Amino acid sequence: MAVPLFLNALEQTGFSTWLRESESVFGFYFILVVHTIGLALVVGPNAAIDLRLLGLAPDIPLPPLKNWFNLMWLGLAINAVSGVFLVLAYPSKAFTNPDFYLKLTLIGFAIWNLQRIKRQVFDLTQGEDAMLAKGRMLAVWSLLLWAGVITAGRLLAYTCSYLVYGVPC
Amino acid sequence: MDFPHLHLLLNHFPIIGTMVGAGLFLTSLVVRTEDVRLSSLIVFIAVALLAIPTFITGVGAQEKIVADPGISNDLIQRHEGAAELAIWFMEVTGALAVVALWQCARRVPPAPWNTLAILVFSLLTVVLMARTGNTGGEIRHSEIRSAEENTAPYAALAYFEPSPAKFTRLMIVNKWWWAFMMDMHFFGLVLLIGTIGMLNLRVLGFAKQVPIAALNKLVPWGLAGFGMNVTTGLLAFVGMPTFYTHDLAFVLKIAAILLAAAAMVVFYLSGAFRDCEALGAGKDAPLRAKLIAGTSLVLWFAVIVLGRYIQPLQDSIAR
């Protein structure tokens, strides 16, 4: 597959080069660290809420868990920004890998699913039984989708065709 | 402080520690004293944690002496194989002890399956650790090398021990296996932060309407995540032992993991958790609990950060 030229142009920009090659503590690996912390903030609390919705730890009252969504949005914001930087560092690597598009699609579905959990399950005008009834399937989807996102993200390192423009992985 | 010093300092703990733990556990079965049983469980957990740095400092210790003409690499390999078998039994014993301690904290009587499993695994660990210690001692001490190695029990043990080179190859021969292990390592991270991390945040005062005792019921899932990560982490180390050994981020990560685990042990055993347990929704945790929870949270995130810096800090410790 021919790699579009604009990816090369993007890669040659000062910022992209700096992200890849900088020895600064704020270079590529710092952004990767931030991306991993963001992942922990999004998926960690999310998984815990899913387990609760699936009937585990029934002592945990559901309504106050709504506060956890703030933490998850923060994690999502961190990862949207750090994710853009990671793509800017290695645009050819990302855009030539079908797994990258799979990851983005799964993230889209996972966020949509998270929104549905917030809107439908954490609508606090209803009782706990109603919340649980609505939450069960969404919790299963949530676990599956985030597991898919993490797996697709991990596989980016193993499935790339180009490291940078014209250089195979 | 270098790897040989650390290895020699640490290596007595798993051997003697499992003997002490198993002795206490057997005593508790005979005299039926709960305190003795709890002590044995705590010893098992401490030793299972200490066995990790003992195991991983062995590679660095080996590199320092393998060129010595008086040293046989075959003896080192035999010792490494013995350790690669013993550590899994040690970690299973530790995990079983965590389950028992958890049940005890919930005031559930000890489950017979658990008691039996601890008994079997701790006694097997005593035997395997003794063999590991003996084969390790023989690397330097020619005076204890004897014909004993050819006896049937020794031969039987040797039969089950992996060849370190083969074990390493097995881990890295297929990149999809490696990818799978790393994926599981991330799942473990998520479980740990989602449960233990959120408990720490609650103790610190975040989303206070969730009672601490209720949130605590999710912690076994975090411990399961920790177990997944100890397993996949040890397997990864076996796959690339020299890579990890010469990496400052890796060494610091292991130190941070041990401190984070210690913070958890302190949280539950110091009474800090008891102080929090009775607190209902909206109640602020006492300062001591907050200090421990804050320390724990910082350490777990340090573990994530250091783990990410393993790759760029390759060869940061001189060979």
Image (tube, rainbow, N blue to C red):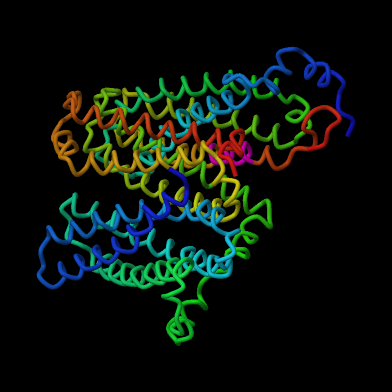
Residue B35 seen in the current view: yes
Report the magenta residues as a range: A146-154
Residue drawn at 59 percent across, 54 percent down: B239
Report x, y in % for residue A51. 39, 41
Image quarter of the C terminus of chain B: top right
Residue B183 seen in the current view: no
Reply above or below: A167 against B68. Answer: above
Report x, y in % for residue B152. 45, 87
Report x, y in % for residue B259. 34, 39
| Residue A48, image quadrant | top left
| Residue A155, image quadrant | top right
Q: Is residue A66 left or right of residue B164?
A: left
Reply above or below: B194 against A30. Answer: below
Reply above or below: B229 against A87. Answer: below
Q: Is residue B31 left or right of residue A145?
A: left
Residue drawn at 30 percent across, 28 percent down: B294
Q: How many marks?
A: 0
Image quarter of the N terminus of chain B: top left
Which residue of the protein is positioned furthest toward the right in this rendering?
A2
Q: Is residue B71 left or right of residue A84?
A: left
